[in-house]
Amino acid sequence: MGCLISSPKNREKNRRWPGHVGEIVVFVPGFRIPQNVDFSSTLSQCLSSSLVQRLSALRTRIVVMAAQEAPTASKPRRRTATQHGGTTLADLQQAIEDYLPVLLGLVKDGSQLMNKVEFVWVNQEDDKEETAVSDTWYEVLSVLHLMAMLSLSQANFLLLPKTPSDGYQPKVSEESRRNSIDIFLRAAGYLDCAVRQVLPQMPPDVRRDLPVDLQEGVLQALCLQALGQGVDVQLGIAIDSTKATLAVKRRLACEMVKYWKQAQDGLINLPLCNSWGEKHQIFVKWKLTEAKAAAYYYHGLILDEANTEKSHTMAVAALRAAEEFLKESKKAAECFSTAPPQSRNPPLWGAMKYLSEKIPNDAANKARINRDLYSHEKIIESAPPLPDFPLALKPDEYQLPRSDHAWNQTEPSKDTNQSKRT
């Protein structure tokens, strides 16, 4: 059974987390950074020296690269190419992919090595900054979480408006938007795998005492918000398309509301009481109100097409609700940017750039027209219910890799053989 040890922050002045995290389109919760682990002291008597050295080298590579990537991921404008033409983020993702198959040998077929090594990670979102757990599944869970956060960081970088070479206003390219959807689905797949395949492998007492950023509710909320942001990008693409109907746009907006509402529900009962956790909750509230503004707007336009007195008054109520949610979302956006660690909201683009202009105008025009047609008493005061559509966007299916073939050729170390002969 895994042993969990947490160390609280001793001195506020020694906190290594940034006070400002740059521009944010996609909220990336506090990174979890791995710390060095001594594999040789616990595994040298059980495994060949070459396998122990390989485990150590692969993880040390991640430790070094993650420490370098965390500040860059927090402030994506800093991201630079490596000498080989890639990025530090891509190199770190590759390092993790190299490490996972070797790591999984420690849990192969119920291995007795599962609880031999104490894995240490530092948590940005938890009051207990450093957590050490003697359970390999905790390491797998932490690695999947890091893979998902790196993906969200990459999506944030893609969706930050960039000034084109012609000097016009900053914008997000069509290619970046479409690529970001794939990245959101990949991030959701890592998190879905963590919830479905990894958490069930851990003893109840270890699961109960996990850092807050690895709790099931947080992982599920992150998965849902990745899907919600993917739909947000889809809605922006639909708005730009002349072929997308009002029905398509309403469906996307209503689905987005469901994703963000479920994400919010998953976070309600969790102790997200520090700055990162509170900022996370504000971000979800912000995006939920934006989604409601879009959904009520398109619902109102479709209701108005029915051309009856009842449908007109319901349309007015829906558009009024859209306007109120738009105002609320602007307040939430401001609250999010000023909440620590402070951030900047980039210029509006995509769906919200369009809707922030259309919703106030259409709501005012529709209300004025209907005041001429109907008495004030006939205007519905409460917004009509939104249609309930099944959620279409699903996480990519991610399966943990098979353990590395080296585990099929493991031999005891020379020291072990010598002790047996003695």
Image: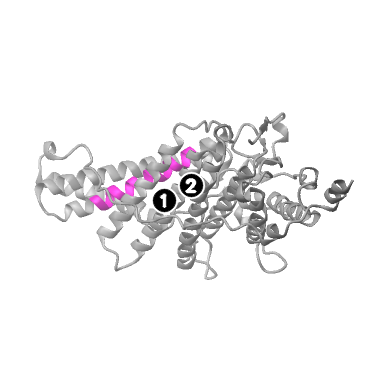
Q: Which residue is mark 2?
A: 196
- Residue 100 coordinates in the image, percent (x, y): 64, 55
Q: Farthest residue toward the front?
A: 421
* Badge 2: residue crowd in 10 Å (few <14, some 14–19, many ≥20): few
Q: Is residue 391 above or below residue 127?
A: below
Q: Is residue 38 in view from this perspective?
A: yes
Residue drawn at x 39%, y 42% is 262
Q: Which residue is mark 1?
A: 228
What quarter of the picture does the C terminus occupy?
top right
- Residue 215 coordinates in the image, percent (x, y): 53, 38
Q: Is residue 360 in view from this perspective?
A: no
* Badge 1: residue crowd in 10 Å (few <14, some 14–19, many ≥20): many
**Mark positioned earlier in the residue sequence (1 or 2):** 2
* Disc 1 versus disc 2: nearer the observer: 2
- Confirm whether the magenta stretch covers residue 53: no
Span highlighted in magenta in the image: 281-299
Tell me if 147 is positioned left or right of 413 in this view.
Answer: left
Residue drawn at x 58%, y 46% is 141
- Dominant secondary-structure state across the stretch colored magenta: helix
The Cα atoms of the two marked residues, 1 and 2, are separated by: 20 Å
Name the amino acid type tagged 1. Gly
Tell me if 421 is positioned left or right of 5 in this view.
Answer: right
Q: Is residue 54 above or below residue 336?
A: below
Name the amino acid type tagged 2. Arg
- Residue 292 coordinates in the image, percent (x, y): 33, 45
